[in-house]
Amino acid sequence: MRSSCKVAQSGAVLATLSLLCLAHEASVLDDSSGWSNYSFPDDFIFGVSTAAYQIEGAWNEDGKGESMWDTYLHEHPDFTADRLNGDVATDSYHRYMDDIQIVKDLGVKYYRLSISWPRLLPNGTDNNVNNAGAKYYRTLFEELIKVNITPVVTLFHWDMPTALMDLGGWSNPLMVDYFVDYARVAFKLYGDIINFWTTVNEPHQHCYNGYGSTIFVPAINSSGVAEYLCSHYILLGHAKAYRLYDTEFRPYQKGKIGITLDAFWGEPKDANKQEDRDAVETYLQMHFGLYAHPIFSMEGDYPPFVRERLDTYSEYEGFARSRLPTFTEEEVKALLGSSDFFGLNHYTTYLMSPSTMEPGWKVPSLEHDTRVKLEQHPKWPKPGADWLTVYPPGFRKLLNWVTNKYGRNVPIIVTENGMCDHGQIDDYERVSYYNKYLYQLLLAIHTDGCKVEGYFAWTLMDDFEWTDGYTAKFGLYSVDFNSPNKTRTPKLSAKNYRGIVKSRRINFDSFKSPISTYL
Ligand code: NOJ
């Protein structure tokens, strides 16, 4: 499908073939039935993901330090949609055995979770390790391993210790070494039993929304400047932590370690317009290549297109030097190849077209630097959040884009994919989302030859969804936040996912909606 659509966009029989492509894409959105014709390889990694601040709670217990999310949300309760925060969340700090049970019930053999940096190092620095925090993670990992579940441990899923945020967080070059110090503590404490690490989760969302705007904490809002500082130093932190593991720990701990990047897919708003097709490429380079190219390309460093654009715009705007910092030769080398796999988070697709200015864009800013307008397709379902429309073929196209650009050397592991709704237990829409996105993944493997080796559903259970508080429900399990036990109940999608994991195929008929208007 992909290749014929590509030809159609540039060839002479454009009109007819474009229609065929559209018809094909529409059919991908329709309900399928029966068993998928392809299956997941026997050694394919199936897992489920969570993150510390979104589930742990116990924000001030047993010696934990504050993270910037604790501090900021206590000071700005209006920041989240429901004025709630992660103080208690799903109470996983106390209820981790319940979590382990439901991960086990899903039948997956991998559980991706994160360490809260300030729970381990209350001030962020390695001179003061919180023993209770250290013990908590040790017990959690050991209990998972006892039931044959491999923990996949993320070091940084956005909960920067407040003490370090007060120093500027990722806009401060010193954060690189503080992060490496923290990584060393984690490798020393757990490397004997943990052999699957990710350094940083979604640096793009973290830097762009948190440093370049006010969408996420720390809400620095220094657009056009701080998001690039954050990107730069977070990349360097990742590379240095990777090199530390590679040289000092891997020789005897024998694990793997990588980074998780995120990307929306982009469809040209008008597939017949070259400028719209170019806009997609520009967007991907500016928002995704910025992070991927230094690590996964053959030559390393920022994408030349991004480098040149930022240098030119900065000069034109009167800056004494580029708003995009420069890597030294040594740093380029440290970054290049610094990931054993391509960790990829993907949720949604936008329509893209060029634009020089839009309401709400600041000058300078990443949006204005990118000059691509994002819109949502009016016909694609939008089950629960403003930003998330459902377009399964976008997933396959993204996997192909990553494979063609960077993925020939390392396997892709999808570290997050999922959708949110309003929390119904009979979540037919989520069942359909997973079936269809996973089917696109099967096509990417079997038809397109993409080397995708794993998939983690986001997320295990309804949790604290950042700015949306508890209003956006992403879980395979529902959580009764009013019950003392924070009772976890499987949704239909949990049962469906379990079926996929067990059979290694998708049965589109397992949990079909009685109403035909679902996704
Ligand atoms: C990606 C982030 O890693 C995760 O924390 C978040 O909850 C999901 N996207 C859904 O928005």
Image: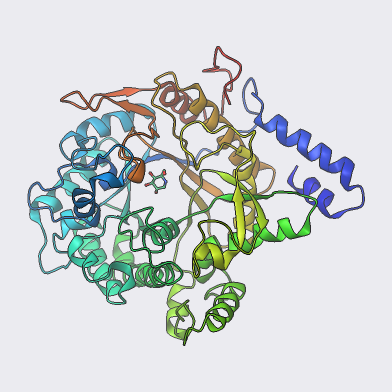
Which residue appears farthest toward the top when viewing the image? Answer: 514
Which residue occupies 39% across, 70% down?
Answer: 226
| Image quadrant in which the N terminus is located | top right
The answer to whether residue 408 is visible is no
Residue 72, position as x, y percentages in the image: 23, 54
The x, y position of residue 79, in whole percent, is 30, 47
Looking at the image, residue 217 sits to the left or right of residue 381; the answer is left
Extreme residue toward the right, this view: 12
Q: Tell how many labels.
A: 0
Q: Look at 40% across and 22% down and name the residue there.
A: 424
Report whether 456 appears left or right of 254: right
Query: In the image shown, does 134 or 23 lie closer to the viewer?
Result: 23
Quarter of image, res 444: top right
Q: Indicate the quadrant where residue 437 lies.
A: top right
Say which quarter of the image contains residue 176.
bottom left
Of residues 326 and 194, the one nearer the viewer is 326
Name above or below for residue 322 compared with residue 385: below
Q: In the current view of this chain or complex, which residue is farthest to the bottom?
A: 320
Q: Is residue 246 visible?
A: yes
Instruction: Tell me: residue 162, above or below residue 349.
Output: below
State which quarter of the image contains the C terminus. Answer: top right
Residue nearest the viewer, comparing 341 with 213: 213
Where in the figure is residue 338, as x and y percent of width and height? 44, 68
Residue 119 is situated, as x and y percent measured from the top left of the image, at 16, 53
